[in-house]
Image: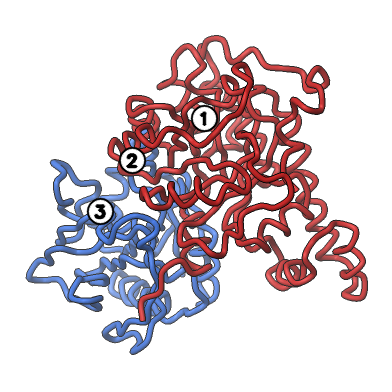
Chain colours: A blue, B red
Amino acid sequence: MKIGVLALQGAVAEHARSVEAVGAEAVLVKRVEQLDELDGLILPGGESTAMRRLIDRYDFLEPLRAFGTSGKPIFGTCAGMILLAKEINNQQTNHLGLMDVKVERNAFGRQVDSFETDLPIKGVADDFPAVFIRAPYILEAGPGVEVLSEDTGRIVAARDRHYLATAFHPELTDDRRLIAYFHDMVEEAAKANV
Amino acid sequence: MAKTGTDLVKRGMAEMQKGGVIMDVVNAEQAKIAEEAGAVAVMALERVPSDIRAAGGVARMADPTIVEEVVNAVSIPVMAKARIGHIVEARVLESMGVDYIDESEVLTPADEQYHLNKREFTVPFVCGSRDLGEAARRIGEGASMLRTKGEPGTGNIVEAVRHMRMVQSQVRKLLSMDLDEVMTFAKELGAPYEVLLQIREAGKLPVVNFAAGGVATPADAALMMQLGADGVFVGSGIFKSDNPAKFAKAIVEATTHYQDYKLIAELSKGLGTPMKGIDIASLSPENRMQERGW
């Protein structure tokens, strides 16, 4: 399996390491053509506004949407979750708009409020180490969205068909259970498309 | 349960800035231009380094009004500078919700012997370093991010190159040496032994290392990325140029695509006059900001 990491800005190397740790090939995606060779894609953490500028600059927006609508899995972490969301609170426009959720940016506060905690994630782990950095969360999830994890009543991990999103950063720890879960999604999607 | 201010949370914040550009700004309007251009963070200052250099006198933490104005203007993280060893300036900035503090040699040091004990703070810190000894001491004190010192406000990349190469080559040396040799290497560098052991275990510095101090063109930014910088700070360069918005975008793109030379050529066209720049040899030692820090 080839899993790409959108490498315009952010914690790219950490995701690439975790992809390789579960036995897939990691591709650092800087150009639109590279999307063709992928079975799945990760939108990493970073600054969503900075990433969006670069997405626009290199005409990535429509190819990324097409990648998603073709049925290939996408996993967004933190800023990646904001890119995936259909709606962003207090903003007129969205980015990719692929996942049926409404998100709030910097929803836990500023950097001094950033935190780590252990969370249960449905179908993944009872005690997943979750690192939240100026993190967003999901305010509202559509009817087809499966909520995988909540922290004090706020949705922080969810799956909508072949889209997976977390408000926290699984790539910053050595716990590979969540990336293994995404790897399974990629394998299933590849089988279904054969 | 939920823990704030841990190493993972503080260092992780800097990991999210990788591959990006952090820009010096002195007001809300500049902060918005920086955000629009794709900056990953802004550094709120009263004066950019070249103006600090020109003004002389004691350079201090910015007026909180400026920091507040910038914090309210943008959604990207806001950093601010405190004087080396100035516990209260750092605490004031932390209380205002600044996302990262630069304990910076650009400002006049408040303490000529001791840096801040950065482990005591919830807010993370970035510090400058010229070699692995300085880098390891700052990590030992709790810095969560490093940057080259370079020579700020000169528009001359030569010192940043020197500092980046120095740290990289000393890390390579550390990784290849016999364990028996590490204690003496620590003594020579003035580096905490335990930090050197951590670097050996990880195979790299435990925190990101950005380029700073003298980045004046898109090609300078790309050069620093090629030398192994995790990202770039741009100080005086952007808002001293003829067309800041265009210049800022060009630096951001050159940082992302640092090996795409055709693109860098395109980006570098028609940017107008960059900062004039200062030859480092013409600066007397007491005018070199990089000499500050211990």
Please tell me whether mark 1 sits on a helix, a strand or a loop.
helix
Looking at the rendered structure, which numbered label has been put on residue B71?
2
At which x and y percent is residue B191? 80, 61
Looking at the rendered structure, which numbered label has been put on residue A105?
3
Q: In the figure, B31 relative to A179: above or below?
A: above
Q: Which residue does the image show at 58% across and 30% down from the upper left?
A: B59
Q: Which chain letter matches label 1? A: B
Do pointers 3 and 1 mark residues of a single chain?
A: no
Local packing at callout 2 (Cα closer than 10 Å; few below 14, some 14-19, many 20+) is many
Q: Which residue does the image show at 46% across and 26% down from the upper left?
A: B248
Local packing at callout 1 (Cα closer than 10 Å; few below 14, some 14-19, many 20+) is many
Amino acid at dot 2 = Val
Do pointers 1 and 2 mark residues of a single chain?
A: yes
Q: In the figure, A66 relative to A176: above or below?
A: above
Q: In what quadrant of the picture does the N terminus of chain B appear?
A: bottom left
Q: Which residue does the image show at 38% across and 69% down from the upper left?
A: A115
Q: Which chain letter matches label 3? A: A
Q: Which residue does the image show at 55% across and 23% down from the upper left?
A: B237
- Asked whether the viewer can see residue B40, the reply is no
Distance in Å between CA atoms under marks 3 and 1: 26 Å
The quarter of the displayed image where residue B41 is located: top left
The quarter of the displayed image where residue B283 is located: top right
- Asked whether the viewer can see residue A142, the reply is yes
